[in-house]
Image (cartoon, helix red, strand yellow):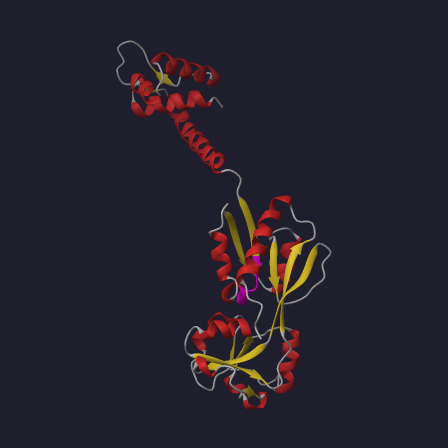
Amino acid sequence: MYTLGIEAFLAIVRTQSLSRAAEKLHLAQSSVSHRLKILEEMMGATLIDRGKGIKEISLTPMGAEFLQLAERWNSLWLETQILKSQGPKLSLSFGAVNSLNTFVFPPLFSAMTQHQPPVILDIHTLHSIPLYEELEKGQIHVGFALREQTLPGVNVERFLTVPMVVLRLGEPSDSNSKLINPNELDPNYELYIPWGPLFQIWHDRWWNPLCLSRIKLESAQLLFTLLQHPLQWAIVPMWIAKSALKEGKFSYYKLSDPPPDIVCYKLTHKYPKPSTLQSLTILDHYLDLLITKDFY
């Protein structure tokens, strides 16, 4: 498409005058007329009626139809120029389970969005198994899961190993002041969150699996809202307990016979796209800088 001709055509339509269009484009009137003529020859039709004695321009039927296309073309051209002026952008598609995205990674997201050059961050919240599947398909570039799985195209490494603790209402200063025996916890007041097969085996050893908890949560996001009674309790990774302390009304305690530590695995593609390597390097920098691994 003849960009200079479209520019001249739109200027004439918007100013309703060849002379004013020439002023707007900082061109001679003959140059504007020449560009319009070339555009009309390319289109095989007259777009603007013009002649002696005609003060205001008017569009031909073909010109009226072409106006919409010209506006769209001009808009796309402007977007292209903006894109060129900004230069290449980095992007990263990031996936993690809900509790990590909610309680661990917000400082990371904040830092990534302020990084220069800009990194376009696409954040996904998924369960562990779908994280592996999406990463192998290339839909996400990096993932953080709570289960270990073997897939041909996925690198898996331990990222965090964190103890599980009891969370309940209380003074934050009381946290970790004593060990709690699981027998002291009334299952009728548990807010149960499924933390995986190993946790379930441990849980079934202490409490009858046939006696269902009054409240079962698929994720920990509602935990701070629902934990309202002094007898209520939940077993959570230490990263949630540390976040709860900031609320000012919760305390956590270690167990005398705790469940297995929860492990967070970092997932990356074995053959990442060259365009994502720089973004992954930036991510690793902020992971080392901002995400504490000392949860003991």
On screen, 287 above or below 231? above
Q: Which residues are magenta?
A: 95-100
**Is 127 displayed left or right of 63 in the figure?**
right
Residue drawn 61% across the image and 52% down it: 141
Instruction: Name which quarter of the figure residue 286 lies in.
Output: bottom right
Give the mark count: 0
Viewer can see residue 63: no
Residue drawn 58% across the image and 68% down it: 293
Residue drawn 40% across the image and 30% down it: 71
**Is 48 displayed left or right of 281 in the figure?**
left
**Furthest residue toward right:** 152
On screen, 56 above or below 245? above
Q: Return the residue nearer the eye: 70 or 120.
A: 120
Membership of 98 in magenta stretch: yes
Residue drawn 55% across the image and 87% down it: 180
Provide residue 191's location: percent of width, then percent of height. Answer: 51, 79
Provide residue 58's location: percent of width, then percent of height. Answer: 31, 20
**Furthest residue toward top:** 52
Q: Quadrant of the C terminus?
A: bottom right
Instruction: Name which quarter of the figure residue 193 lies in.
Output: bottom right
Provide residue 148's location: percent of width, then percent of height. Answer: 68, 66
Instruction: Name which quarter of the figure residue 259 lies in.
Output: bottom right
On screen, 53 above or below 223? above
On screen, 265 above or below 230? above
Membership of 167 in magenta stretch: no
Provide residue 224's location: percent of width, then percent of height. Answer: 45, 74
